[in-house]
Amino acid sequence: MSAADQATAPPVPAAPRLNEVLAERPPVRPKRENRLRALDGLRLMAALMVCMYHFTGKNGEVANSWHQSPGEMFPTLSQLSTYGSLGVQFFFVISGFVICMSSWGRTLGDFFRSRISRLYPAYWVAIVMVTGAAVLLPVVVHPVRPDEFLVNLTMMQQPLGVPRVLGVCWTLWVELKFYVLFAVFVIWKGVTYKRVVTFCILWTLAGAFARVADNPLTDEVVMRDHAPFFIGGLALYLIHRFGSDLLLWGIVGMSFLLGQRYSVMALWHPGAQGEFHRDPLVVQAIVFCAFAAVAVVAMGWTRWANWNWLTLAGALTYPFYLIHEHLGWFFIRVLHRGLGLGSYTTLALSVLSLLTLAYLMHRFVEKPFGPRLKRALTLR
């Protein structure tokens, strides 16, 4: 029974000391052997949210591919898909959960080998595919210079100010910074309940101080706007592993409160040409649902969702996310403007084609070359 449950029983007990709350080894739930397949389904759902935003919820290059604003072509759908940009925040919550789970019991070297072999093979192929498409049809996306292409292979183009081959790769830079922070402050000495909780609290405070300092370098390192989503995911994994306690739910609640504020301030406004209005209340509701969906998984309420196809859905998410934006614009231009297919037919065929390409990338790139790269990175 928690301290909160005993609060009404006389006499009132003394508040627990911080070192007791941050106990090194709280009671552990029996380990669940089954894969969290529901989490795989949530990952693909978040990717499809972002995809619909890039295809029907904004203007810019995609409007050129459609030859008119998606707000005019999809007057109802566009009002929903404009909120799909929040799929990125959904991803960050899931990422916090998954990284905490996958790093438990691993060394620092194990963690970085796992991340490099997971991220780079599909990323390199996506860079080549999108660059090749840009060379063949530069009216959709202009190809970058050779020196810019080579920098993009490092995944460091964002801080260096180099044009991005993949429009979505700014989120990979955010993820990389999260990995480094978590590795330096937690994994380096071994992942424990106490270290993860301490990291969550200190990172939350650092984000608040960074906003006061308002320094670009501090913002870049601390990621004050994105940190709450990762922190919430970390705390939700601790709830999954160790069970509920007031401290962990407090961290999740604080993360939601800070995350919804950033989302409202950054995403409530209309699009560039005013067609895509976002209601602040809807933004808040979607952010809440992102936290709530991962919380449902953390509490073990989705163990019934154990279908094999969810594992495949999770495997397709990363390659699909990498290629969907720019290659999708090529598909739309060719199918809609080139072949004259209807708007909804074009939309469906584009998404299905991208999922097929994602499967091929997973089957012939990630599965064979990821493990080889991981073995090659092993220190002798």
Image (cartoon, helix red, strand yellow):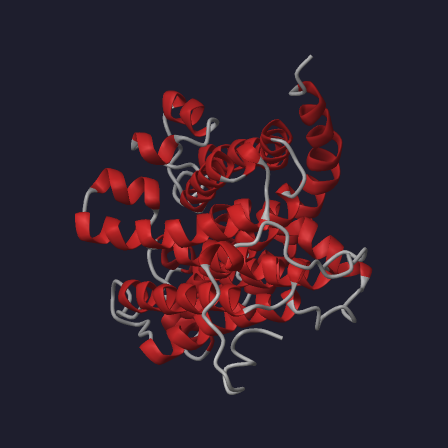
Residue 288 visible in the shown view: yes
In this rendering, would 156 be left or right of 347? Answer: left
Can the viewer see residue 162? no
The quadrant of the image that shows the N terminus is: bottom right
> Who's the residue at 81% across and 59% down the image?
308
The vertical placement of 327 against 343, above or below, is above
Residue drawn where x is 40% and y is 66% of the image: 254
Quadrant assignment, res 244: bottom right
Q: Is residue 281 left or right of residue 87?
A: left
Q: Position of residue 217 (x, y in %)?
A: 25, 38
x, y percentage for residue 268?
Answer: 29, 70
The one nearer the camera, 68 or 212, is 212
- The quarter of the displayed image where residue 65 is located: bottom left
Furthest residue to the front?
Answer: 11
Q: Quadrant of the C terminus?
A: top right
The percent coordinates of residue 104 (x first, y second) are: 65, 43
Q: Position of residue 224 (x, y in %)?
A: 32, 52
> In the visual, does 361 lie left or right of 271?
right
Residue 125 placement, left or right of 254: right
Q: Residue at x 63, y 57 (%)?
A: 26
Q: Is residue 246 or residue 220 the one in the foreground? A: 246
In-front residue for pair 263/102: 102
Q: Is residue 104 above or below residue 28?
A: above
